[in-house]
Image (cartoon, rainbow, N blue to C red):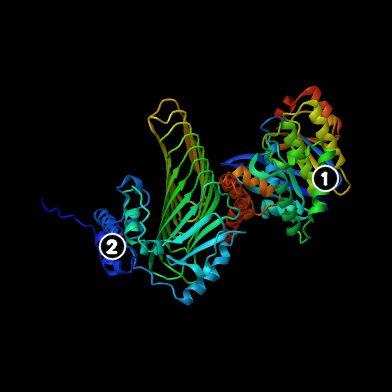
Amino acid sequence: MPLLEVKDLCVSVEDREILHALSLTVNKGELHAIMGPNGSGKSTLSHVIAGKPGYEVTGGEILFNGEDLLAMEPDERAAKGVFLAFQYPVEIPGVATMNFLRTALNAQRKARGESEYSTPDFLKKVRDVAKSLNIPQDMLRRGVNVGFSGGEKKRNEILQMALFEPALCILDEMDSGLDIDALRIAADGVNALRAPERAMVVITHYQRLLNYIIPDYVHVMSRGRVVKSGGKELALELEESGYAQFDDAA
Amino acid sequence: MMNVVLAKTESGKVADRLFARTSDRLPGSGKVAEARRHALETFEREGLPHRRLEEWKYTDLRALMREVLPLAPRPDAAALGRARGALTSIAINNAASLVLVDGVFSPELSESPGAGVSVRALREALESGGDLPSTRSTDAMVSLNAALAADGVLIDVADGVALARPIQIVHVATASAASHFTRSHVRLGRAARATLVESFIAAEGAKAYQTHDAVILSIGDGAELSHVRFMADSADAANISSEFFTIGAKAKFNLFNMTSGGGVSRFQGFVTLAGEGSELSINGVNLLSGSQHGDTTMVVDHAVPRCTSREIFRAVVDERAHSVFQGRIIVQPDAQKTDGKMMTRALLLSNQAEADNKPELEIFADDVTCGHGATAGSLDEGLLFYLRARGLPEKDAQGLLIQAFVGEAIEQIADENLRDFAASQAQRWLEARR
């Protein structure tokens, strides 16, 4: 059974259709890249999978391990193993990062009927992951993302990914706002999480990211549809010829 | 001389009858009785405050409270037993409690705060010829309080004494459909340090009572007072609390009020900075739901130069509740180099919730730094989604954001122990929402 099956998905925002009968199948262990120009619907797809309010699904379905994902609340999806790394992680003043991580992790475990992490186990786990991502301890004491640089915010997303161990990671424009060093650290973090039981969907405008995170499949989106799919060489092809060729196809 | 006939308002007449019936129960004779009669006359003219009075615009007691209830009977042994049972809800680590049950000081439930402090019940002081603590206020509710105050506590912290234990004045209501009037005086000597908590709670089964409290505090030069209040009355009670603070030079005053109980409540604080170089930190949180009405009104009068005041207020308003915050900063002509800032924010959790924020600056000096800000809004959808996408159920996500929102005010509490206690009270309110 595929991990994620998006079938003929139609999505509207305020009566304007953004996704038109989009389909996508992702199996465990695979890494898919979704590329496309601004406004092609890449981020909309990631938001609908994660359950962000404000989108109306007018047709099609999304199955996650065979279950109807669209019937679930965003927190239920998280507990089932869906993780969206945000393009713009929000700042939450007054909620210490450590407290947030523990609350979120334990909420997911509780929803799955698992026991809560003990404090020493939790702290050790966070410290180990933070160290590997070059996240200083004082960042974990600050409010969630408050005063973090763009690179620190993205690393905080990857820290959460490593901590929650989701079955499906969707990375929305992970490379936006990162310089090359920050991008490398983030990409190393993502690569370290690749596993046979886990799938990843990497959404990006630029091919650059895919030099660091090598995809198994590349899909090109244009005007709310997947217009072309292929292997990793498709990304290089796009780098040469740009997205203009797909405008007609769409 | 001509005779002047005073027009009496309806609620004034009620109070008049109440006074006539109970004046023989009120302690004090001679000048105290005269002061009571004078205060009663002021109230008779004004009656219960209403919306046409600027200071009471958002809290119309004629509509919300309607009448002044008869005085509660003197608590008997059963009432004291019920009061004792209620004290656990407000038990603060290491605090020496002074307990007033239905407005009557209870030595049985109270304990001595230790050396360097003298504590006396107001009734006892008045009966032995003492004065009624007075203010210059002409506010109708403060006048009514002066007319009918039957008891209270007089606390005197000697110069230079640093109290090891917090003092907590606890008001416990046990009688239903009755009112009690208390008036207290607190003096903090020069360079003294103290933590004073004042809490309002109800014994099980106490319903629809009215608490009328006034506290007059003077803080000496170089003294430090941390003062935390918890208004946690039963949901259908009314609580009108007035506090008057006079602050000496180079003093530090840290005030925090939390209103989470009461059907109708008003905390009005009047701070006069009377000595140079003092620092004020005044903060508060209103946590309201159902049809609660909670009003916090603060007037800070910078009468002398070089004082700073910081005010942070947060209101969380759910269901059909109504929160009011009025904050006035007055800078007198001589009060140069005043630095006064005030920020008030309200979080509305339902479409029917209401919050009124009224910040006012009255500045008569030219070399000052003053500012204020006020906002009202709902929880940020973007933040909520982020938390939910990380696995937090909706109520938990809301709870975390609300905690952070009120945390900004709670963090200002100087005493760590009380800061934790206030946070736990807020947490308890949040859990009750689920």
Instruction: Report the front residue among B9 and A29.
Output: B9
Q: Chain of mark 1?
A: A
* Mark 2 surroundings: few (<14), some (14-19) or many (≥20) residues within 10 A: many
Q: Quadrant of the C terminus of chain A?
A: top right
Residue A199: which numbered mark, if any? Answer: 1
Q: Residue furthest right?
A: A196
The residue lying at 78 percent from left, 44 percent from top is A161
Instruction: Report the front residue among A32 and B291.
Output: B291
The residue lying at 70 percent from left, 34 percent from top is A148
Residue B429 seen in this snapshot:
yes
Instruction: Report the front residue among B285 and B37.
Output: B37
Q: Residue furthest bottom?
A: B78
Tell us which disc is closer to us: 2 or 1: 2
- Which secondary structure, mark 1? strand
Spatial separation of the CA atoms under disc 2 and disc 1: 75 Å
Percent x, y of residue B21 = 28, 69
Percent x, y of residue B397 = 64, 51
Residue type, label 2: Ala
**Residue A242 picture quarter:** top right
Percent x, y of residue B119 = 48, 59
Q: Which residue is mark 2?
A: B15
The residue lying at 80 percent from left, 49 percent from top is A123
Q: Is residue B244 above or below residue A212?
A: below
Left or right relative to B73: residue B403: right
Q: Chain of mark 2?
A: B
Residue A220 seen in this snapshot:
no
Instruction: Report the front residue among B51 and B212.
Output: B212
- Which secondary structure, mark 2? helix
* Mark 1 surroundings: few (<14), some (14-19) or many (≥20) residues within 10 A: many
**Residue A43 picture quarter:** top right
Left or right relative to B412: residue B104: left
